Each structure stands twice: as C-alpha cells, then as structure tokens.
Amino acid sequence: MASTKLRVTIATFFFVLCFLPSRFSPAAERPNIVLVMADDMGWGDLPCYRSDSKIHAPNLTAMANNGLRFDRFYSAAPVCSPTRGSCLTGRHPYRYGVYTANKGHLKPKEITLPEILKQNGYRTGHFGKWHLGTLTTEVKDANRGGPRNKQHFSPPRQHGYDVCLVTESKVPTYDPLLKPVDANRRAWDALTDRSLAVSYGTRYWNENGQVVMENMSGDDSRIIMDRAIPFIVEAANDKQPFFVVVWFHAPHLPVVADPKHVNRYKSESVYDRNYYGCITALDEQVGRLRDTLRQLNITDNTMLWFCSDNGPEGKDGAAPGSAGGLRGRKRSLYEGGVRVPGILEWPAKVSAGRSTQFPAVTSDYLPTILDALDLNFPSKRPLDGVSLLPMLKGIDGFRHKPIGFQAAKQCSYVGHQHKVISQDAGVTWELYDISVDRNETTNLAEQQPARLKQMVAAFSVWSESCRQSDAGADYAK
C-alpha cells in the first residue's frame, strides 16, 4: 500500500512538473540576459568594425569573434533617451512620448522587459545610465531631477527592476561625481588633486531611492560593473535566471580616462586621448563581465548583447568618434547617426565568427527575448521590433517589417534593402539602396519614383500608428 502511494505521488509530481507554466521551468532552460550599451559610440570606433581604429578594445573584439556581429544594427533614435526606451518596450519612442533626450519619461502604462521577465521568475537589475525619467523629486539632480519636474519622476523600480544603481543622465567617465573648477564640456585629464574639484551635480541612486556615495572614485565603467557583477554572482549562485542592463556612460562627453588608459594614447590631444582611453576602460569591464560568466559556468546559456545608443558626437573630422565613413553623426537619421555597433554572444544558440547584413534595431530586443523564452507579449498594442530568433537560427534572411524613425523634422523608413529619408517633416524625400550604398551618396528618388511613393506611403501609415499610440490609444482606460 505504501509503495502504491509512493508511485502515485511520484507520478503526480512529474505530471505537474510537465504542465507547469513556462515561468516555472528549470532555470537551466531559460537563458540569462545581459544588455550592455555604450553611450555615443560610433559605428567605426571599434577595431572589429574598422581595422585601422586607434582604439584598443580586445574584449569587444573577442566577443564579436565568439558571437555574431551585426553590420546593420540600428539605434531606434539618433539620441540617447528614445533609444533606451525602445530597448525595454520593443516600441518606437514616439509611441510613448520620449521624443528626444531630456524630454518626457517612460510612462507607467508601458510594458517593459524587466516587468515581463520578473513575472516569469527572473531577477532584474539595472546599472549605469537611466535617462528615462528623473530619480528624485526632492533635490536638484542632473538635468531635470528635483521639485520642478515631479511629473517626470520615473525611476527603474517603477518599471520592474529589483535592484539598481543609476544616474539620471550623463556623468564624467572618471570620478563621475566631480569636475575641475575650470572644466570644459568635452574632456579633461583625470584629476590628481581632488581637493581642487567641485561637484558635477549628478548623483547615483539605488532601488530604494537613496543616494549612493560608496566606491565613487576612479573609472566610471568599473564603478558600474562593481555593482553588476555581485548581482550576477548572487543570482547564479541562487540558480535564478537574471536580466541585467549595463548602460555605460562612456564615451559620452565629458570624456575622462584613467591615467593607465590615457597613457596608451598620450601623443593624442586631450579630447582624443580621453575619448579613446574611456572606451578602452569600458572594454576592460566587458572583459571582466565575460570572465565572470565563464567562472560561473553560465556563458553558454547567457545572451550577452552589446550596442551603442546612437552615433558619435561632434563634427566629422573635429571629434575623435568615428562613424566609419557613414554619412551623418549623432542627431542625424542618416546612417552615421543611427547605425551603431551591435554584437550578440550566446554560445548555446549562436555559432562563433558570424556577421550579418540583416537590419536589426534596439526595438528588436524585447520580441527576440520573449520568442527565445516562448513567452507572449501581454498586450495587443503595436510593437515596432521583430524577433531576430529565426535569423539567429539561419531560417529567415529577410526583414519583412521596415524600421521607422522620427526625430524632430527628420523622418526615415529603412527596409531590408532600401531607405527613404526626409529632412523637412516629409515635404521632400530621398531614396537610397543601402545594400550597395551604405554611405548614402546616390539619391535614387528620381530614378525610382514608384518605389519612393510606396515606401513614403508605408511610412505615413506607420507614423499615424505612432501618433495614435502617443495619444493614448494603446492604454486601457
């Protein structure tokens, strides 16, 4: 009798186990997810994209060699805040009111990746830059934080994160809370005497809304990774899958680098050597992250993504960031403003040494990750991203949903092969075959009027959908 009861109990246990929802499946079957982002890094900055780059970045090169390098990876916008929101929502920023940097905030009714993953058993953490709303209503902080902008208070903890260490916006990339009395906007060499420094005006905040002051000296990328790694180690030791966002400030202005990193570029100007040096420092922390995943024996089952939030700052030829010969830079919807480095390392699913011309965008993160986890998006509201999983498997080599862009008076619609772009809110349009003319030198608008008309019409339909979303049509009353 006892043995019969035991057999029934065991059978019942395995029956229940087989039919549990996916969020309760064993952690080993669900990949860990890490989204790493640089700030204002150009498409041509890294050696894995441009062989003559001056920047020493061996860890990102190794990551590309061990995974998949996207040669047409796009930020959803030509500036930072809108792109960041697209990573978490799978939607174009004009749908939820983050039209440019330091405008709007991530709305409570938007559904985010950390919210979905947390509901499905993931531990969630965000480290580094936030820039999707203010982090305090009490004191003046960064660009907008404080009593005057209470309507834009929108910290990570309101969007599904368990743990965070974040700044509202930019900070110096070395000694992030300080600046020299006579600091300029672009760059300076690291201070040797901090008694001569003054506050930069930006704070780091944790998930409890508290200011964090410990371990705030030295390289900013290292400060960020010092918080991300213990989070990863703890989750891995607890056998819990994790979702981690690491948004570095480098190489956004002001660029400041550790003397040991600057020394490699000591013959360059102050601006150039600190720009190059802070990217090398960022790369060092990417290597530290990859080493940690290996030591924990979770590399194979971790999706490790890397990209930039937009193209490089400054005028071409007058600033060290490189768009790799592409037309335009930060704030432009030409390729140099939105085509950015994009790398995925996921040994369990993606073979090493691959590169692809498949056009991908930061809005693709959410649908790709949900597809990998066999999860449905819990709403019928429109998504602008697509799942890249078929492409990663080598099944689908064509992007059927074009990528739409809006930025002030600029409009653009990028298909698998062709692109239309307007600089005057859709009054006049240019047409390019990006597959053979990535530098956008030959306008085909007069030669191919039918294609131009079809793509502009499709953009108009998409743009109207964004307008309706922004007016609140996607939110339940």
Image: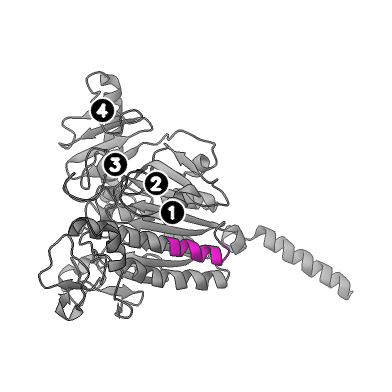
Count of marks overlaid on the render: 4
Circle on res. 305: 1
Cα separation between marks 2 and 1: 15 Å
Sooner in the amino-acid sequence: mark 1 or mark 3: 1
Cα separation between marks 4 and 1: 31 Å
Q: Position of residue 196 (x, y in %)?
A: 14, 78
Residue matched to label 4: 431
View extreme (left): residue: 182
Circle on res. 324: 3
Visual colour scheme? one colour
Tell me which segment is drawn in magenta: 287-298
* Mark 2 or mark 4, whichever is nearer to me: 2
Whether residue 376 sits left or right of residue 410 in the image: it is right
Whether residue 38 sits left or right of residue 137 in the image: it is right
| Residue 291, magenta (yes or no) | yes
* Amino acid under disc 1: Trp
| Mark 2, other Cα within 10 Å: few <14 / some 14–19 / many ≥20 | many
Sooner in the amino-acid sequence: mark 4 or mark 1: 1
Is residue 67 something one can see in this rendering? no
Residue drawn 73% across the image and 63% down it: 14
